[in-house]
Image (cartoon, rainbow, N blue to C red):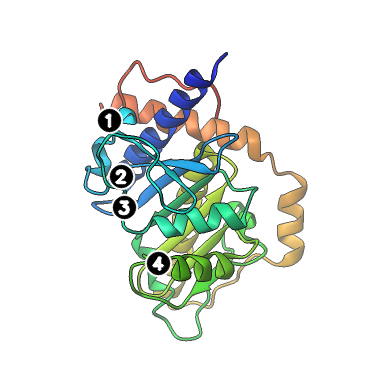
Amino acid sequence: MTDDADIHHNLQKQVAAATRMLVMEDLLDYSGHVSARIPGEDAYYIQPATDPRSDIDPERLIKVDFNGNILDNKGLRPPVEIPIHGEIYKARPDVNSVLHSHMEMPIWFTMMKDVELVAMRPRAVRWENGIGRNADPSHIKSEEQGKQLAADLGQRHACLLRAHGSVIVAESVPAMFVDAVHFAENARALLQVLQAGQTPLPLTAEELEQVNKTDMREFHNAKLWQYYTNKGRKAGLLPADWKFDEA
């Protein structure tokens, strides 16, 4: 990619592809949204409020600033929960992509007494510094609610919203997508242990340190992004001509 237009178009295709693939993997349905920080701007791309997540069009993505102002003239309305994205981007300059979803298994752990969503699988090392908790079960529609969610997320990479959903943040759209896959995978592993009537044995700090020593996050994210985009093309969910410069 050599100019800003190409960089922006690549980013828009990543957002659209990630959204469609999250639907493909049953991690997103009729609701929820993916956003991506626009390089060099206090703004991000996000989908229109009512467009089906399974068919997001890169050309219909809306450009929104961190205060919720629409910066293009497409006449489209963003999701009501854009304070989630804007306030996290304000608070976390290291974050370049945000997912808000309602994937079911992680939500269940906000409705259990004295049961924490802990690291069961090696890729859960991403959340070794914990998973935030937000106590608000309603839509996050105000600046105040967004700021509280960003505070509850802190420097972590995921936050659970009470009986509502979750937020996952990452350094890129592909990384966010891969983290979402592993977030659900880890929740499923813990739930399966509990359903078997057994006592969970989460990974210890020493085991997580061992995982960290051999972690190849960049390579792993690129590998899985290629796997899932190929799967999406074969399923007819992603156009064959959607090519991505980087994962």
Q: Which residue matches tag 1? A: 237
| Marks 4 and 1, how far apart at CA | 34 Å
- Label 2 neighbourhood size at 10 Å, few (<14), some (14-19), many (20+)? some
Amino acid type at image mark 1: Leu
Percent x, y of residue 55: 24, 35
Tell me the quarter of the picture where residue 125 sits: bottom right
Q: Which residue matches tag 2? A: 23
Q: Which residue matches tag 3? A: 79
Q: Nearer the viewer, residue 23 or 223?
A: 23
Q: Which residue matches tag 4? A: 142
Percent x, y of residue 14: 44, 32
Amino acid type at image mark 4: Ser
Res 117 seen here: no
- Of mark 3 and mark 1, the one earlier in the sequence is 3
| Marks 1 and 2, how far apart at CA | 10 Å
* Quadrant in the picture for the C terminus: top right
